[in-house]
Image (cartoon, coloured by chain):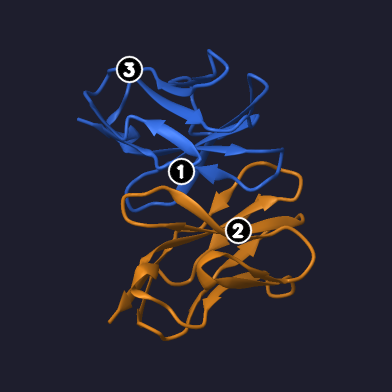
Amino acid sequence: EPEVTQTPSHQVTQMGQEVILRCVPISNHLYFYWYRQILGQKVEFLVSFYNNEISEKSEIFDDQFSVERPDGSNFTLKIRSTKLEDSAMYFCARGKSYNSPLHFGNGTRLTVT
Amino acid sequence: AQSVTQLDSQVPVFEEAPVELRCNYSSSVSVYLFWYVQYPNQGLQLLLKYLSGSTLVKGINGFEAEFNKSQTSFHLRKPSVHISDTAEYFCAVSEEYGNKLVFGAGTILRVKS
C-alpha cells in the first residue's frame, strides 16, 4: 500500500496540451517532491516544495512547469504546454522533515503524442 | 554536486545464490545514502538507508548495505535471493543537509530458477 497516491496512473495527451498530475499524501507531511524518469534513463529531481513554496528546482523545471498545493491536501504538477520529450513516469514523493528518507508514489505515466 | 554510479546495468543470478549490487558515489560534502527498489509497474520503495552510525545497515526483505567512506561505496547485498527479488534497484545520495536525491542509473536484478 503506497503512502502516496498519484492520479491518474496513466495520462495520454497531445503535444501542446496542458496536463495536471495529482498527488495525495496520506499522512500530514510537509515536504513534497516531484521526480521524473524518462524511459531508460535515470530518475531525475524536478522540484521540492515546502510550506506552500518551491524550495529548490532543477534546470528541467522551466517555465512550462508549475506546482501548487491548492487545498492543503492535493499536491499538483502542471505542465502548461506538453512536448514530446515530457513523456516520462512522474513520481511524487513526501518527506517528514528536511532530509528524511522520501516515500514515493506509484507514479503517473505521461505519454505525449 | 553529487553523482552516483551503479556499475552493473543488469545482474542475472540463480535463486538462492548471493548477490551484490554495486554503487559508488562522489560528493564534496557529507552525504546520506539510500537504496530503492522498483518492482514492475510500481513506484520506488525504500529498501534501506544510511544516515549515520553503523556502516552496515539492514533493510527490508533481507537486504543489507555497507557504507565505505574511503572507497565512496554503498554496495547492496543479499545472501540468498528469491524469484520475487526480481526488480530494478536504485542507489541514491543526498547531501547531509539537503533534500534532493540524486539517483544512479539503476541495476536490474533478474533472479532465475
What residue is shown at x 36% (from left), y 44% (from top)? A38
Q: CA distance from mark 1 to mark 2?
A: 18 Å
Q: Nearer the viewer, residue A30 or B109?
A: A30
Q: CA distance from mark 1 to mark 3?
A: 27 Å
Q: Quadrant of the N terminus of chain A?
A: top left
According to the colouring, which chain is orange?
B
What residue is shown at x 71% (from left), y 38% (from top)? A97
Q: Nearer the viewer, residue B89 or A113?
A: B89
Disc 3 residue type?
Glu
Which of the labelled discs sits on residue A18, or is there none? Answer: 3
Q: Are marks 1 and 3 in contact (CB under 8 Å)?
A: no
Q: Quadrant of the C terminus of chain A?
A: top left
Q: Earlier in the sequence, mark 1 or mark 3?
A: 1
Disc 1 residue type?
Pro
Seen as rendered, the residue at the extreme right is: B53
Report whether residue A113 is seen.
yes
Q: Which is in the foreground here, disc 3 or disc 2?
A: 2
Query: In the visual, does B33 lie left or right of A6?
Result: right
Residue A80, how many percent across, how many down?
A: 38, 17
Residue B77, how many percent across, how many down?
A: 54, 76
Disc 2 residue type?
Phe
Tag 1 secondary structure: loop
Asked if marks 3 and 2 fall on the same chain, the answer is no
According to the colouring, which chain is blue?
A
